[in-house]
């Protein structure tokens, strides 16, 4: 041991570890580590409001468009999607509010953010592409992106309803391709109901239970 | 075997701080205080010791016009924590035998 290391050892034992500091055994150390890791497990903030916001926005958009297009026969049926910019404003409000409240950044939270930023960007690019080639082809692709987003999110937070909701969207995207564009709107509504709305409410319920449990 | 345990980590509050930071990217001072049930004064002292040992990084910034302190584990801290856990396991294994 060189003199510098010895000095370091003396400093640590005389100053950093004062004698009045409570002694604890290695078994207690492991228990403490485990309890602290368990406490951070529940630190993933509640994201259910995003799923519910977009789930309901898309669901209302689909039902409204179907009603305007198929039942009312109104040529400007696509006006139903004016709900998207409204949802976008609410989304940014939620993001700002959550950022202020956020006290911890987890690796899962970070993965979640990157995933949804890339999916959100993909939606914008898809909107640009379909505005050129025709919106009638868009629905299976949107369902496919809902599938990826919710399946990966559900896997990241180990929440089965979200994971299974996402999985169901994969065959729904294929089924939608076989139907008329009018029926595809209803399949899109079904996809968001199964992958966003139902898991969203279940996720909210789970967080409430967790909060109650943690006191 | 106890001699192998890192004295900086073999302290309840400092070990609690490191165990919290090991599983998150970064955490605010108030979050660590809540989870460890410690006082601000004691926590500040222990955070400073971990910072001086190079085990954590302390980031001071402003959030909504108020000072905000965030902590994150460093690479040295990660290695020290891993070695500490290994030493603990060795000790427990010897004890069991």
Image: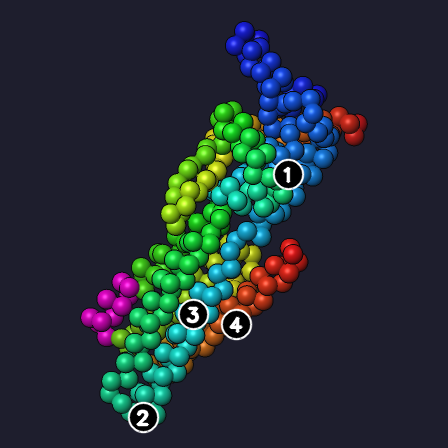
Residue occupied by mark 4: A198
Residue occupied by mark 2: A72
Label 2 SS: loop
Q: Earlier in the sequence, mark 1 or mark 2?
A: 1
Instruction: Decide: few, some or many residues near mark 1? Use Cα within 10 Å; few <14, some 14-19, many ≥20.
Output: many
Residue at 48% in and 61% down: A47
Q: Is residue B28 left or right of residue A41?
A: left
CA separation, marks 1 and 2? Answer: 63 Å
Q: Are marks 2 and 4 in contact (CB under 8 Å)?
A: no
Q: The residue marked by circle 1 belongs to what chain? A: A
Same chain shared by disc 2 and disc 4? yes
Same chain shared by disc 1 and disc 3? yes
Q: Check residue A87 for magenta coloring.
A: no
Direction top: furthest residue: A3
Residue occupied by mark 1: A33
Query: Vertical placement of A186 versus B10: above or below?
Result: below
Same chain shared by disc 4 and disc 1? yes
Instruction: Please identify, in this view, whether the residue under mark 1 or under mark 2 is nearer the observer.
Output: 1
Residue at 61% in and 47% down: A39
Q: Quadrant of the C terminus of chain A?
A: bottom right
The magenta segment: A124-134
CA separation, marks 1 and 3? Answer: 37 Å
Task: Tell me the number on the disc at residue A53.
Answer: 3
Q: Earlier in the sequence, mark 4 or mark 1?
A: 1
Instruction: Please identify, in this view, whether the residue under mark 4 or under mark 1 is nearer the observer.
Output: 1
């Amino acid at each position: 041991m060189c003199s510098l290391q010895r000095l370091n050892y003396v400093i640590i034992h005389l100053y950093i570890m004062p004698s009045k500091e409570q002694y604890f055994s290695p078994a207690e150390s492991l228990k403490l580590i485990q309890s602290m890791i368990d406490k951070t497990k529940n630190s993933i903030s509640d994201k259910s409001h995003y799923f519910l916001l977009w789930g309901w926005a898309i669901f209302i958009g689909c039902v409204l468009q179907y009603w305007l297009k198929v039942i009312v026969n109104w040529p400007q049926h696509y006006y139903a999607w004016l709900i998207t910019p409204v949802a976008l404003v609410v989304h940014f409000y939620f993001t700002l509010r959550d950022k202020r409240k956020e006290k911890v950044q987890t690796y899962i939270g970070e993965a979640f953010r990157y995933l949804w930023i890339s999916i959100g960007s993909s939606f914008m690019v898809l909107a640009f592409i379909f505005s050129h080639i025709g919106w009638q082809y868009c629905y299976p692709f949107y369902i496919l992106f809902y599938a990826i987003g919710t399946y990966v999110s559900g896997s990241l937070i180990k929440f089965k309803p979200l994971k299974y909701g996402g999985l169901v969207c994969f065959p729904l995207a294929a089924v939608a391709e076989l139907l008329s564009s009018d029926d595809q709107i209803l399949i899109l509504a079904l996809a968001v109901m199964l992958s966003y709305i139902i898991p969203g409410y279940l996720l909210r319920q789970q967080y409430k239970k967790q909060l109650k449990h943690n006191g | 075997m106890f001699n192998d345990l890192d004295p900086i980590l073999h302290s309840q509050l400092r070990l609690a701080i490191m165990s919290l930071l090991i599983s998150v990217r970064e955490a605010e001072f108030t979050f660590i205080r809540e989870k460890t049930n410690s006082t601000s004064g004691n926590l500040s002292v222990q955070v400073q010791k971990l910072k001086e040992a190079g085990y954590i990084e302390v980031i001071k910034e402003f959030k909504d016009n108020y000072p905000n302190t965030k902590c994150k584990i460093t690479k040295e801290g990660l290695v020290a924590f891993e070695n500490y856990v290994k030493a603990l396991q060795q000790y427990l294994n010897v004890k069991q035998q």
